[in-house]
Structure formats: structure tokens, C-alpha cells
Image: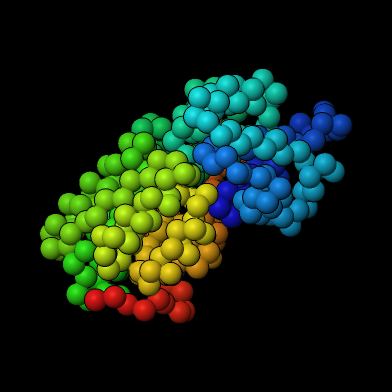
Amino acid sequence: MRAFIAAIALWIVGMPAAVQAEQPKRLPQVGFLFIVPRADYDPAKDPLRDALLEGLKALGYVEGKNIHVDWRVPRKPEEVAEIARDLVEHKVDVIATTGPLSIEAARRATDSIPIVIIACDRADRLVASIARPGGNITGMACISSDLAAKRLQLLQEIVPRLSRVAVLFNGAVPAKVAELQDTIAAAKTMEIEVQSADVRDASGFTTVFAAIKGGNPQALIALAEPLTFTHVKEIAEFAAEQRLPSTYGFREFCDAGGLLCYGTNLSTDGAHAIAAEVQRANTDGDTSWMRKLTVLRRSHSPKQRR
């Protein structure tokens, strides 16, 4: 997610000086759109919001002083499209978003305002091509489905006799259902049984955790999307309590106590990639995408179950 922060801030840095001079009293406007399907969400305690503001401050942009961040976090899917349109009506300079619902809503709402995205989905559904997407969309694609076999291989290194793995996914997101099927197909070639664990809202974690525990898996794969991302700490804690070697698609899982992350590095190379592409989009209207795969391991792993 730190990649996201750098992309937004450096886009602002790349704004033409003439534009800033023409509107000296108007602060750069960043609209952040991110659906959080949990009733107990408190923006004042949101680590993503804190990280965004801290990241902007590190680059010289202080909320209320020389930048304004319009933080929009709908709780219900049906609210997303209206909020995206409202951001466009307020003429924000850039929309930052993640998650298929939010990305699609932003894409439908504007074809001119730059949209910085992190897509844990098939990016070719959003752009003309991965190599040269064109248009107003830029950012990073995780392409998580391509990594199913590799994640299983990494878990096999930790649990050599791995024969059963639980996969936590949001069955309401078609991309995650497809990713589950990719994982099942890869597991079949490795003679690994997959226990599917479907969670579709915040209230479902208690039940799905109990089901995973009852299935007695030897490892856990959590598929990345907004619902699991906002509960990444709970997932990591559950895996640790059950002594389950586990893997996720973003670094934040390891930061929260998870064992293994394999996917796009959002905090280092990804930050520079997104920032470069957003600045390029601001000058010539063209973009390109970069995918960087990084393996992050915690120094202390949970006890292996065999």
C-alpha cells in the first residue's frame, strides 16, 4: 500500500507549475475510494489512512496545509458508484482506488481524471493491454492467479509432506473464485487437497475460521482482496494461533504477523513503478505497467504441521 501512497504524492509533484500558479488558493485534491465491508470501521483508527497521510507528509504534503485528501470509504457495494461520481463532480485531481468494485466505479465515472489503481484482478479487463493500457488508468496489477502454483511450492518447502491446504477467499468476487480454481488445479498436480473456505462479509470470519480449524489443514492461503485485506491482522493471528504456515499476496500480511507473502511488492519497487507511470501519464497521456514479484519471509515461522 505504500506504493499507492508514493504514486499519489509523486503525481502531485508532477503537476505542471503553471496549473499551480493559476490556482494558488486551491489545494491539490486527492480522492481516495476504498470499500470496507465492516460495520465497525473507524477511519480514525485505519492504518491505511494513517500511512497515506504520513507518506504524503514525508514528501512535503501536509493535510489541510498544502494538500486535501477526500477519504471516501463506503460500507456497502451499492454506494460505490455514487461516491465515484461525486468525486468527479468535486473535480479531484486524481482518484486513488483498489478493489474491483471501486476500480470499475471510478472507470465508469471518468475518462479524464487520472485513476491510480492496485488491481488484484485480471488487469486486461480494465485496460487495452498490459503493456500499453492507454487512457486514464495507471497503477499496478497483482495478477494473483498466475502465482497459485508458486505459492503452493513455497508452502511445500516449509511443509515437505504437505497434502492438505485451506484457501480463504471471498466467493462474492469472481476474480477470487477464478483464483481458487487455479489453486485447485495446481494443487491437483502436486497431489494436494484443497479445503475451500468462503468468507463474504466481516461477520463470516468466526464461522470460516472454525471450519478451517475443523478441516485440519497443514497450511493456509488467503487470497487478497478488500475484505481479506481489511482483516489481514485477524487472518495472521488465526494462522499463528493454529500454527498454520500461511501465505498472502501483500507485504502487510507479514507486517501483521503472517509467515509468507508472495506477490507484488507494494512498498519498494512498486512505489517507484507507480510513481513513474503516473508522472508519465500526466505529461503525455500514456502509461505502462510493471509487475514485480517479491518473496518476503518472516524470521520466525510458526511450528510446522506435518
Name the residue nearer the viewer: 124 or 295.
295
Give the vertical position of 155 relative to 19 (above or below). below
Q: Residue at x 43, y 69 (%)?
A: 241
Quadrant in the picture for the C terminus:
bottom left
Q: Quadrant of residue 12?
A: top right
Give the vertical position of 306 relative to 273 (above or below). below
Residue 116: horizontal and vertical position, in percent? 55, 39
Q: Quadrant of residue 69?
A: top right
* Colour logic: rainbow
Give the vertical position of 22 relative to 283 (above or below). above
Q: Residue at x 70, y 23 (%)?
A: 90
Q: Residue at x 82, y 28 (%)?
A: 22
Name the residue nearer the viewer: 86 or 59.
86
Q: Is residue 46 left or right of residue 138?
A: right
Is any atom of residue 88 visible in this view? Answer: no
Is any atom of residue 118 visible in this view? Answer: yes
Name the residue nearer the viewer: 155 or 245.
245
Give the vertical position of 300 relative to 250 (above or below). below
Q: Is residue 179 left or right of residue 289?
A: left
Q: Quadrant of residue 215?
A: bottom left
Residue 170: horizontal and vertical position, in percent? 37, 43
